[in-house]
Image (spheres, rainbow, N blue to C red):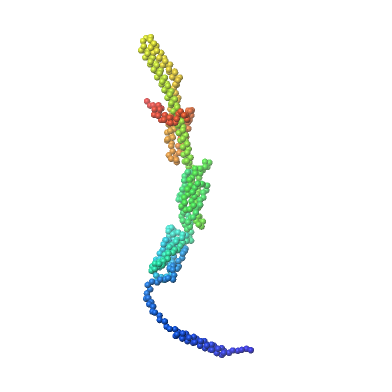
């Protein structure tokens, strides 16, 4: 069975519900009015509201900067305008902003806190600013009205560049250098810094070398003393070329190479030549001493023979003179005249005895003169060719000269037995006798 509800039914039901709702609302309103009438009124004291504000103090929050960026990255040749803000109303307080340790070109408005920076490229070219270097900037702000409110903080700014400028290796000497063995090569490795600085340096050579100081970074020193055996005796070339490559690399392994060419020529081995000269000088002194000892023996022998012959000559003359005196002073036929006639014959007899006992040593005299002359000459040569320091440039010529003169002296006296050591002849006596003026007078050239 279908039930059909008419529109009139729904209209009557809606009107009835609205009437019930209005009745409940009026009842609640009457209850509230009755409750308010029962509560007695409260007297509230009057409050004096100030007409102006002397100082506003915020105690609900710590004084701080709201928009501080602790790390700023900025492209070169660009500018920045950045407004710092604090958690206070700017119209109610006065602030003082300041910077410390700021890079070139950065400034801040002390009243408003506006940070201004222009990273001009010329600042980087002149070296006043650098790429990829962290600049720590100290930032401070203070409430002028309340000194207890201040902030000291910092932020870091780094400049970068998309244009890469390569760093260069620059030795402090020319690309080509002429040196000799024994020379010391010393120079510094400088760097022209580009976008990225050179962090390490390696070295290569076309010929192995040793005992050198290697530079590892910019402004380090290369030091090498060229050995005297760098050019071997059997080498056909009298000059060698040594190429030294200094390879610098940055942190991204961008490389640059500096090349130094050393043209090395044979040089004098001064330590070896100095020892050779010293040995030759000692040999000279020893040989001169032997000559002086030989001269001492020869001269003493010649002098002894000369004294003996002089004694025979005086005795012979005295005997002849005595015979003459006795033969003239005595009476005729007396024994005195007889002795006087015999004595001259005795004097003549002493002459062959003198020649037999003490023959004349002309050869020894000439030999002694020759030995003395050679010794004097060698002493003069040794003194004339002495070295002037350990690195005398004429060392080779002086050694050659001394060797030639020593060889000639030995050839000149090759048949003469030299006295090298004898206990009866001391070097001191020989030296004293050799320089004795009385002895030298006998061997000087006499001019009439």
Q: In which quarter of the image is residue 66?
A: bottom left
Question: Where residue 196 appears, x then y in whole percent?
Answer: 48, 57
Rendered residue at 41%/63% (across/down): 99
Tell me where residue 87 sits by quadrant: bottom left
User: Is 275 located above or below residue 105 in the figure?
Assistant: above
Whether 198 is drawn above or below 288: the answer is below
- Depth check: give the residue in front, 443 or 353: 353
x and y percent of residue 302 in the render?
43, 24
Question: What residue appears at the point 51 percent right and 52 percent down from the top-left corner?
Answer: 202
Q: In this view, does 244 lie above or below 296?
A: below
Nearest to the observer: residue 24 or residue 201: 24
How many badges with numbers are in the image? 0
Quarter of the figure with the N terminus: bottom right
> Which residue, as the protein is rendered here, is positioned at the far right?
1
Look at 46% across and 46% down and name the residue there: 184
Q: Report x, y in % for residue 371.
A: 44, 29
Percent across and percent down for residue 358 are 44, 21
Tell me what residue is drawn at x 37 percent, y 25 percent.
448
Residue 105 visible, this angle = no
Q: Report the front residue among 300 and 25.
A: 25
Inspect this view and state whether residue 333 appears. yes
């Amino acid at each position: 069975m279908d039930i059909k509800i008419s529109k009139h039914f729904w209209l009557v039901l809606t009107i009835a519900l609205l009437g019930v709702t209005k009745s409940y609302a009026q009842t609640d309103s009457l209850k509230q009015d009755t409750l308010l009438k029962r509560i007695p009124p409260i007297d509230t004291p009057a409050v004096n509201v100030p007409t102006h504000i002397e100082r506003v103090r915020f105690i609900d929050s710590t004084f701080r900067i709201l928009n501080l960026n602790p790390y700023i990255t900025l492209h070169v040749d660009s500018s920045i305008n950045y407004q710092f803000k604090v958690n206070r109303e700017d119209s109610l307080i006065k602030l003082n902003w300041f910077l410390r340790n700021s890079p070139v070109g950065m400034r801040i408005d002390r009243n408003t806190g506006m940070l201004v920076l222009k990273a001009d490229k010329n600042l980087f070219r002149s070296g006043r600013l650098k790429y990829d270097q962290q600049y720590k900037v100290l930032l401070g702000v203070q409430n002028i009205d309340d000194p207890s409110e201040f902030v000291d903080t910092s932020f870091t700014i780094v400049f970068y560049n998309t244009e890469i400028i390569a760093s260069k290796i620059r030795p402090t000497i020319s690309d080509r250098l002429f040196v000799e063995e024994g020379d010391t090569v010393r120079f510094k490795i400088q760097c022209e810094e580009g976008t990225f600085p050179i962090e390490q340096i390696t070295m290569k050579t076309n010929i192995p070398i040793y005992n050198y100081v290697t530079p590892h970074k910019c402004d380090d020193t290369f030091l090498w003393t060229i050995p005297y055996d760098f050019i071997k005796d059997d080498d056909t070339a009298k000059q060698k070329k040594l190429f030294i490559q200094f390879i610098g690399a940055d942190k991204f392994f961008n490389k640059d190479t500096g090349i130094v060419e050393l043209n090395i020529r044979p040089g004098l081995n001064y330590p070896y030549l100095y020892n050779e000269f010293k040995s030759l000088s000692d040999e000279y002194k020893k040989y001169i001493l032997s000559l002086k000892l030989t001269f001492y023996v020869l001269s003493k022998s010649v002098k002894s023979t000369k004294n003996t012959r002089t004694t025979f000559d005086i005795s012979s003359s005295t005997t002849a003179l005595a015979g003459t005196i006795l033969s003239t002073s005595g009476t005729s036929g007396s024994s005195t005249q007889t002795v006087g006639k015999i004595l001259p014959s005795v004097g003549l007899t002493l002459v062959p005895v003198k020649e037999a006992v003490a023959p004349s040593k002309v050869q020894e005299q000439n030999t002694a003169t020759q030995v003395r002359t050679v010794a004097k000459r060698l002493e003069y040569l040794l003194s004339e060719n002495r070295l002037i320091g350990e690195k005398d440039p004429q060392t080779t010529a002086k050694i050659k000269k001394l060797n030639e003169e020593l060889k000639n002296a030995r050839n000149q006296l090759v048949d003469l037995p030299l006295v090298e050591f004898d206990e009866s002849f001391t070097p001191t006596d020989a030296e004293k006798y050799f320089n004795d003026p009385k002895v030298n007078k006998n061997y000087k050239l006499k001019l009439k």
